[in-house]
Amino acid sequence: MRLLPLALLLFPVLVSSPVLAGQKSVTLFLDGARVEQELAASGGYLELPLPDAFAPGSLRVKAPGGTVQRVELVPAEQDRRRSAELARLRERRGELQDRMDALNRREEIFSAAAKSQSGKAPRKTKANPDPVVTLQQGTEFALNQMEAVYRSKRKCRLALDAVERELATASKGVASARIWVTGSKAQVSYLVSSERWTPSYDLRFSGEGGAELLLHAKLPQREKGVQYQVVRGTTAKPGAVEPVRGEFPVLARYPLAVTGAVGAQPPERFAFAPVEAGLPPGEAALYWKGEYLGSAPFAGGGSTGFSLGP
């Protein structure tokens, strides 16, 4: 019987969490990325906020072991729940800003009062037989009030910062996908234009005639727990999928047949046999006998030379 209250407490939490993140992977192209994720569908239904960089028309939904019954894309401005949450947060932000304005005004008042008390010349009267003590009491009171204002301002500022973060999170996304399936989960994928991999090269010359070209994939900031893979192509013309690890993985190595070098040691210009066709252009770093000399643009496939200078 003791378990019943706990179950009753957990039930609303379980019901109000329609989307639970499962396995997620990101395939990076030269012009974007495809996000794939498996999501739990509570009661055969889930909602998925789509990011700002979502590519219209790219959403795909499957239901493992079941069927996709219905999919609705609701623009952010038409999502009543999101609009209500944004309105609540904006109202809360306004209240906190008003509170901060009032505290600033109180700070000005007590600051002026403290200066006024400290600047008064003590005068002994019948009503004020000990003016020094009276002035000290007045000054201490004003300072104590200012300390209280400072504490309140600090709390108000923290609350305001928290609301601003919530507003930024709630404002993200161009739409929400509402999905109905038969079964308990759905597999969702869509394209985004905000993430991609960037080609980056190493040109390594041994100084004894040997040379090598390395193709790296410079990756965007990675999300913890997400599997990443790279495709040497675009979203319209993809190629083979290559799993990657780290933020700067090596995708390929090519030998370079050097035909000439110009300049004092170390040289700044190199000529070599045409590199493999189809390599995308990118930035290249030049290494001579293991020493880094600088970086410059590299034309990619079919290139027959490289120079650090103009």
Image (spheres, helix red, strand yellow):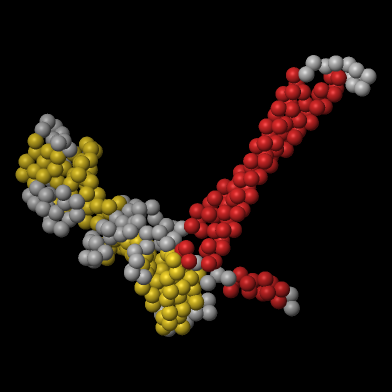
Residue 66 lies in quadrant: bottom left
Image quarter of the C terminus:
top left
Q: Residue at x 10, y 33 (%)?
A: 263
Residue 34 drawn above or below residue 187: above
Residue 212 seen by the camera: no
Query: At which x and y percent is residue 142?
Result: 76, 30
Residue 263 drawn above or below residue 180: above
Query: At which x and y percent is residue 241?
Result: 27, 65
Image quarter of the N terminus:
bottom right
Q: Residue at x 54, y 50 (%)?
A: 164
Query: At which x and y percent is residue 124?
Result: 88, 16
* Extreme-left residue of the structure: 259
Is 146 on the left or on the right of 173, as rendered?
A: right
Is 66 on the left or on the right of 118, as rendered?
A: left
| 290 or 246: nearer the viewer | 246
| 48 or 184: nearer the viewer | 48
Residue 290 lies in quadrant: top left
Residue 150 lies in quadrant: top right
Residue 242 drawn above or below residue 219: below
Query: At which x and y percent is residue 83?
Result: 53, 62
Residue 269 seen by the camera: yes
Q: Residue at x 46, y 58 (%)?
A: 172
Q: Residue at x 75, y 35 (%)?
A: 145
